[in-house]
Image (cartoon, rainbow, N blue to C red):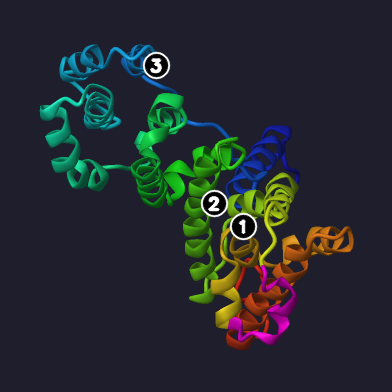
Amino acid sequence: MIVSGKKISSIVIAGFIVISMVWPGPACAVTWEERPLLAWEKRALEVFDVNNYDRVIAMAQEQTGDPNGNVPVFIYFSHAQKYYLEKNRASAAYYKQQYNMVINRLSGANLAVLTRLVVMPQTSWNAKINNSFIEAAFEKAGNELYLGAILFYLSNTAPEVAKGAVGGLCAILQNKREIVMNGGTLSQEDRAWMSDPTLLKLLIRKTGESISPLSGFMSKLPAVARKKVMGGPSLCLALIEDPALPLLREAAGMGNANAASTIQLVQDARGECLARYPNSTWYSATGR
């Protein structure tokens, strides 16, 4: 049977369509960036920075829409400043009474504003509250929606912001870990960002920023205790598992004591997964 040129072309095109539907394309890269400020949020930060707190409160109250939930944040921080600087009684009452309401409403949508407010010199007196707000916002941001922002904030020069970002990242990685531990397989996109050398090197560098007094005794501790002792960047690397090992060994060889301890955490995590799924890899319970 002779097949016409048109039929051959149709068959080839159809074949390409089928292949494109089933063949996985390149994994989508995660962009490390924070969510942009709204125009009024940017202006309110500028006014706050010149200590015009009454104007900030008025600007916030004028907003008819507040998609990021920053109206109560601006009002609370402004009253905090008026309480501290002016000894304003009404602001003092607001500062004390509205704390729970504000912190309970925080989410990842507040990060762009919060990470700027807490590093302003004039709010440094309120470090305890600032830190609690940052921790709460990053904890709520520990999901896919804010992954790019969390990765962006890992490099923030403010220790409290970077620490909060590590906590948010750990929450996301724990969710990924549970997918594998429950018999699943991570997506190509997840494998790509989790094994990104830029992320791994950043986390490893953070493990070396402070030395745990127990780093030399990690091998003598039970696995559960090791996880609790280390935490932070080391826990993130343990949740990623195998992709981190080559760079961790390199860092350990260059004198990063916490990198050496983190290797033990990674091996603990790998062993736990293998005990449940003997054919597993770091990204799949089935090894596929």
| Tag 2 residue | 166
- Name which of mark 1 and mark 3 comes first in the sequence: 3
Percent x, y of residue 267: 71, 76
Percent x, y of residue 235: 59, 64
Q: Are marks 2 and 3 in contact (CB under 8 Å)?
A: no
Q: Is residue 70 left or right of residue 242?
A: left
Q: CA distance from mark 1 to mark 2?
A: 6 Å
Which of the two residues, 8 or 267, is positioned nearer the viewer here? 267
Magenta segment, which residues? 213-223
Q: Tag on residue 272?
A: none
* Disc 3 residue crowd, few under 14, some 14–19, many 20+, Cα 10 Å: some
| Tag 1 residue | 233
Q: CA distance from mark 2 to mark 3?
A: 27 Å
Q: Is residue 166 left or right of residue 201?
A: left
- The residue lying at 68 percent from left, 47 percent from top is 199
Which of the two residues, 275 or 60, is positioned nearer the viewer here? 60
Q: Secondary structure at mark 2?
A: helix
Q: Quadrant of residue 227?
A: bottom right
Q: CA distance from mark 1 to mark 3?
A: 32 Å
Q: Amino acid at mark 1?
A: Pro
| Tag 3 residue | 49
